[in-house]
Image: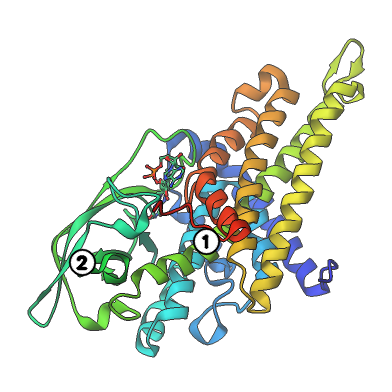
Amino acid sequence: MNLDLTDEQRLIRETARDFADREIIPRARDNDRAERFDLELVQRIAEMGYLGAPVAEEYGGRGLDYISYGLVIEEIGRGDSSARTVVSVQTSLVAGSIEQWGTEAQKREILPNLCSGEWLGCFGLTEPGTGSDAASVATRATRKNGGWSISGSKMFISLGNNANVAMIFAQTDPEKKHRGVACFLVPTDRPGFTTQEIHGKLGLRASDTAELALDGVEVSDDEILGAVGDGFKIAMSALDRGRYSVAAGCVGIAQGCVNESVKYAKERRQFDRPIASFQLVQELIAEMVVDTDAARLLVWRAGHLKDRKQPNTLETSIAKYYATEAAVRCANNAIQVHGGYGYIDEYPVERYMRDARVTTLYEGTSQIQKLIIGRHATGINALIPE
Ligand SMILES: Cc1cc2nc3c(=O)[nH]c(=O)nc-3n(C[C@H](O)[C@H](O)[C@H](O)COP(=O)(O)OP(=O)(O)OC[C@H]3O[C@@H](n4cnc5c(N)ncnc54)[C@H](O)[C@@H]3O)c2cc1C
């Protein structure tokens, strides 16, 4: 693997960095305080082409390679994880799944709208009673009028209140267990589809989070993604992309912690000297630098494998696990470097801490990543106990 970025990749990173500094960071604190899902910012992100970054150009995307996509996500993640969540969900979970599994008609109808930001999409897997054990979704799809009727509820769904199309994972035949799960592309204006905002989150406060209720929502066979029974495979393939995006966003948080801490430590004086000159403060910073570098290299390795279309579930899990935990550690250290000022939102580090915290929970908790890594190492599947 060549660790040198190409001229084009460097330019993509510089452009994304500049965009994050100019458009995202100036709004981040106010949006966080107001718990505001900033649709105007979403539109700016769309104008940059980031909502379709790795999607093929023929479907309205930018056709970027995965390393470039990771660089864009890193910069947006440094700016604001709520904004990064929009890109991750729209691009990696929703558009990527439709590009991989959709019919030509589904791709032509939906992808250009997602890439342009005309539509938002959401990924409805988690339910009130079903999280890590995603194969056990209780939302039911039953045959009706030559199509399907879906009933159930979905919990913690990012972009759910603003989405035009929802990927809904539902069980078609409980006896078949995960082989009975199907993924439906549900227009959110269908009768029986309602949403409720979830507020009071620790972090990601500027991100739209919803509970979805489906009460006899009717869809046609043309609105199934893949085949009936492919739902679980579709969810897992989406998470392989989504976890990469979350990991890259966490590299951005970690780098943001380094940048902010170095700047603050050189300015802040105690005992007549900048605090950066104290060895114990440098220790905090050095730990952050190492974590950031290691996380970035793991993300690049996963991106390299994705670009070569090689299996990468293990490497993506390792990157997701390491980068998300590293972001939490870095944010904690960054608050320590800032002292009392790190505890208030005059500086971004307390938001980094609150925003980083969810990344070890969603798209597979750290425990689930460890079970994936352990399964590869031992050949024993501890995820599903015998
Ligand atoms: C802000 C936010 C946004 C989200 N966005 C989305 C979204 O867009 N779409 C979506 O579908 N979901 C979304 N989620 C849901 C998220 O993916 C789930 O919360 C996550 O998968 C964990 O599920 P759970 O909360 O039910 O926890 P549980 O599965 O109940 O886990 C609770 C604890 O038990 C542990 N645990 C569970 N099983 C095992 C096991 N076998 N071995 C060891 N430990 C185990 C977990 O690691 C965790 O520590 C979001 C969540 C949040 C908070």
Q: Nearer the viewer, residue 174 or 190?
A: 174
Asked which secondary structure carries label 2, the reply is: helix
Residue 253 image point, x, y percent: 66, 44
Q: Position of residue 166 (x, y in %)?
A: 32, 65
Would you say residue 125 is visible in this rendering?
Answer: yes
Q: How is the image coloured?
A: rainbow
Question: Where does the N terminus fall, quadrant-wise?
Answer: bottom right
Amino acid at dot 2: Glu
Q: Residues within 10 Å of mark 1 (few under 14, many from 20)?
A: many
Which residue does the image show at 79% across and 35% down from the upper left? Answer: 287
- Given contact means CB atoms under 8 Å apart, are the residues at marks 1 and 2 in contact? no
Q: Is residue 338 above or below residue 193?
A: above
Which sits in the foreground, 273 or 366?
A: 366
Q: Amino acid at mark 1?
A: Gly
- Numbered label attached to residue 175: 2
Residue 293 vs residue 315: left or right? Answer: right
Report the residue at 57% width, 40% height from top.
356
Q: Sequence order check: which comes first, mark 1 or mark 2?
A: 2
Pick out the residue farthest to the left. 145
Q: Give the residue number, with chain letter if any, for mark 1.
A: 242
**Based on the displayed image, in which of its 4 quarters is residue 186 positioned?**
bottom left
Of the pair 186 and 328, the residue shown nearer to us = 328
Task: Describe residue 44's horizontal placement relative to residue 384 as left or right.
Answer: right
State the image quarter where residue 191 is shown: bottom left
- Distance, label 1 to label 2, CA atoms, is 29 Å
Mark 2 neighbour class, 10 Å CA radius: few under 14, some 14 to 19, many 20 or more: few
